[in-house]
Image (cartoon, rainbow, N blue to C red):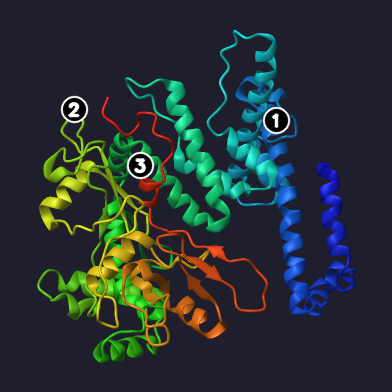
Amino acid sequence: MSFIGDLRDGVDRLAQFAELDCEATTLAAGASALSDASVREAFTAVADLSRHVQKLEVALAGVIARRSTRAAGHAGLAQTGGFRTPVQMVQEITGIPRSEAIRVVKVGETLAEGADAEGSRVVDDVLPGSDARRPWHEPLGAALLAGSITHAQLDVIRRGLGEPPLIEGRAEDDVVEVWRVAAAQLIDEAPRCTVEDLSASARAVRDAIDPAGAEARWAEHYQARSFRMRIDADGRTHGHIVFDDVTAAFWQSVMDAALRPRRGGPRFVSADEAAQAQQLSEDPRTNEQLAFDLLADLVRAGATAEAKDVFGTKQAGVRFVTIRGAGGTRGGGAGGLGARDAFGRLLAVAHTEDGRVSVPGSVIDRMVCETGVVPVTVDSCGNPLDVGRESRLFTPAQRTALAVRDGGCMWPGCDRPPLYCEAHHIDEWCADGGRTDIDRGILLCAYHHVHLHLTGWKIVREGQGAFLLVPPPGEGSPPIELRSKAPLRWMFDPPPRTGWRTAA
């Protein structure tokens, strides 16, 4: 079916709902008259139609950008309409924020570059000597037009992966091919995660395939750290902080440790912790006010107070995870962590358990000196190795291994980090004689853990295969494969090795 045909089909799907065939001023009332099933069906149809419209929007934005270059001057397409830039033209015509207009134009330019490459291949058939190259992000444009990803997903994948570097001793085409395959793998993951998680995954992949570049990115973020205060016209003092990556992860852990009862933290805690959690849940202050008071208490207390006196029984801290030997050698470097560059820096990256922050090898070295390491042994597919336990609950060591493997709540689309999760036995402890083995446990946030038990969902696993989320009986939907949120999954299923993980 043609593009316009797809649009007509989408409109026809909406036309079946007579309640929506009304004036725009009464649209809210018409939508309210729909049944629950009709609301779900209509919303799905609207989402599909919106994705089709977005394709055309970004394609046209790419044409606007191509015809409004600096070289075109005042004769450019945007400029002849009185707009200084393509972004301004898109922003004013659509009414969207400038940040969104920038994204639309960038995605449009990606499509335009892909169209140029397609044209180049036609030329190559006629002129075999042509040296035109396919851009590494070509699969992204093709996936957008095919409906596999949205323009927001395309944008975060391209931004996250960045441009392929020039690596001494490596053929440029080989490096570009690694980026192209990485983009294809992220496209495959896109339907199963949020845009935020996809962005974190793209950055994790980038650092895995370019650990040397991770050093430069870390240094750039570190140099940008800052704190400033200002007083507004009403006499209120404002503060603005730009964190470096490690400090940001630590500060987030402080907030999580202090506020997790208000944000859906685990329910299986001691009586004292439960009492404190109940007290915090009933506190009339907003989360933002609690965070501010926590910051003030931390500054006042300084290093003289015990951690529990400031932010409760769960001490804040950041756990970074890396793979021994991930830099390209087994047993190389200090402690067998991996190969090193000419400056002695470890060629590896580490990630927080949820994958949202990564650090380069030089920071790993420093952390090993300061805090040491906790080894977690896994098999060749990334499954933690462990033995059965007699206890009903998972031990702290087992929960560490689950955090390394799962990276947070494994429910599709959930973004809760390991700190907010509970360990679920996929074999019920009482009914099925379930054992507290890591390979029979999975992380779920408190909400989804309760939801699973109350609504008839079930998680199953055959041997060391994937965890499958099985819908309640009678729904007729197929099982959903659960995917780890942990960044280290890319270490076990990376883009093809074309020399990028070994020393030159």
**Residue 87 in view (yes/no):** no
Which one is closest to the eye, mark 1 or mark 2?
A: 2
- Regarding mark 3 in the picture, which secondary structure is present there? helix
The three-letter amino acid code for the residue at tag 1 is Gln
Quickly name the residue at label 2. 342
Query: Horizontally, is 461 left or right of 52 in the view?
Result: left
- Regarding mark 2 in the picture, which secondary structure is present there? loop
Q: Which numbered disc flags the more N-terminal residue, 1 or 2?
A: 1
The numbered disc on residue 425 is: none
Q: Residues within 10 Å of mark 3 (few under 14, many from 20)?
A: many
Q: Position of residue 140 (x, y in %)?
A: 59, 39
Q: Residues within 10 Å of mark 1 (few under 14, many from 20)?
A: many
Q: Position of residue 380 (x, y in %)?
A: 32, 50
Q: Which numbered disc flags the more N-terminal residue, 3 or 1?
A: 1
Which one is closest to the eye, mark 3 or mark 1?
A: 3
How far apart, in angstroms, are the residues tagged by discs 1 and 2?
50 Å
The three-letter amino acid code for the residue at tag 3 is Ala
Query: Residue at horizontal 19%, vertical 34%?
Result: 340
The numbered disc on residue 208 is: 3
Work out whether 323 lies above or below 26: above
Query: Residue at horizontal 29%, vertical 80%?
Result: 393
Query: Residue at horizontal 32%, vertical 20%?
Result: 169
The numbered disc on residue 79 is: 1
- Number of marks present in the image shown: 3
Q: Which numbered disc flags the more N-terminal residue, 2 or 3?
A: 3
The three-letter amino acid code for the residue at tag 2 is Ala
Query: Quadrant of the image for the C terminus?
Result: top left
